Image: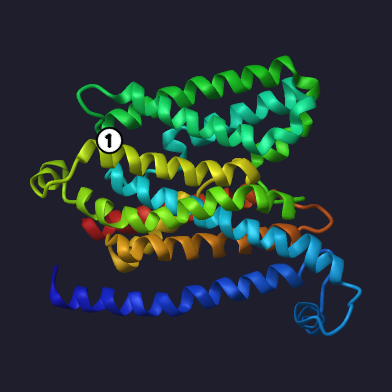
Amino acid sequence: MSKPDLLRRSRCRWILAIVLPILLIVVSLYSIVDGAIHIPFADLMAVLSGQQQSVYRTIIIDLRIPRVLVGMLVGACLAASGALLQGVMKNPLADPGIIGVSAGGGMAAMITMVMLPQFSYLLPITAFIGAFVTAIVIYVMAWENGASPVKIVLAGVAVNALLGAVTNGIMVVFSDRVQAVLPWLSGGLNGRSWHHLEFMAPYALIGLLLCLFAIQPANLLLLGDDSARLLGQRVELQRFLLIMLAALLAGAAVSVAGLVGFVGLVVPHMIRLWIGEDYRFLLPYSMIGGAALVVLADGIARSWFDPIELPVGILLAVIGAPFFLYLLKRKGAARS
């Protein structure tokens, strides 16, 4: 890489280190104050500082703050999961769905809500288990004297198709009960409370902290399997652990937010265009960027379409798909 490119990336890293946290704070405040009921900023500050009992206290403390915090964790987990998978698979198109998280979590949620409605209170844990177990099954199916990225992708495509077919079959057989499931399948943060945050936070925070230990092996795997082995790395073990970490992160997000897409695909890819592949910067920047994107999208979905609340997963797909196509076109033009 030329010296001007190195200087440009170094400058971009400093800029993003300042801009991304400020952006996260701004969109979080926006999501708290805006909505069907607009809350004056002065009242928000009064409630947060405990100076007075504002009429908006219940809305701020019990509804919007936990929803924003859940959105932050969901976005951070999905973006970190996507960044890890794109490096492990050596494929910038990889995202949490490629390891079966979406299909596994979706089918587990469908079974719980449609076939076993009496256990609906267990939805977060069943979706998490379904996502995590599916990722393990895909890795085992891809194993044959090692699990190469290509084999994992192919196994993921096959398992996703199978689980998707089973999910659609359940929806057809129990069509009278599907209405309650559709918002979850679309992905959203409607009704998320302190209870959901308490369930998700341990898994999410543990996964995000483990990302600190994933930086070095992720960087070494970028060199290629042979080069990593020459440096004394246990490539297959590291690849398995990184995929399981990505599954843990994505499973934690799916368990409370449903099938939210494009965060793990677009955010790491966009950050990578600015600062390069180095996971010392890519992982933390992706976490902050993913958190900001989900919180902003949820605030827009909740306030711009009043009185209808658009599921955030639909809005992210509408925004993410064209933007990602633009990135692909731009990257292809640059290579040519």
Above or below, 37 against 87 in this view is below
- Residue located at (82% from left, 75% from top): 39
Q: Is residue 33 rendered to the left or right of residue 327? A: right
Q: Amino acid at mark 1?
A: Pro
Left/right placement of residue 287 relative to residue 10 reads right
Q: Is residue 320 above or below residue 137?
A: below
Residue at horizontal 34 percent and vertical 32 percent from the top: 153
| 134 up-or-down from 248: above or below | above
Report helix, strand or loop for mark 1: helix
Give how far across and how far down residue 279 sits, in percent. 31, 60
Q: State the residue lying farthest toward the top.
A: 173
Reply above or below: 42 against 158: below
Counting from the top left corner in percent of width and height, residue 165 is at 55, 19
Residue visible at 64% across and 46% down?
Answer: 257
Residue most extreme to the right? 55
Q: Can residue 275 be spotted in the picture? A: yes
Disc 1: CA contacts within 10 A as few (<14), some (14-19) or many (>=20): some
Q: Nearer the viewer, residue 249 or 294?
A: 249
Residue 236 in the figure: left or right of residue 287: left
Identify the residue at horizontal 55%, vertical 65% (top origin).
292
Mark 1 highlights which residue? 149
Quadrant position of the N terminus in the picture = bottom left
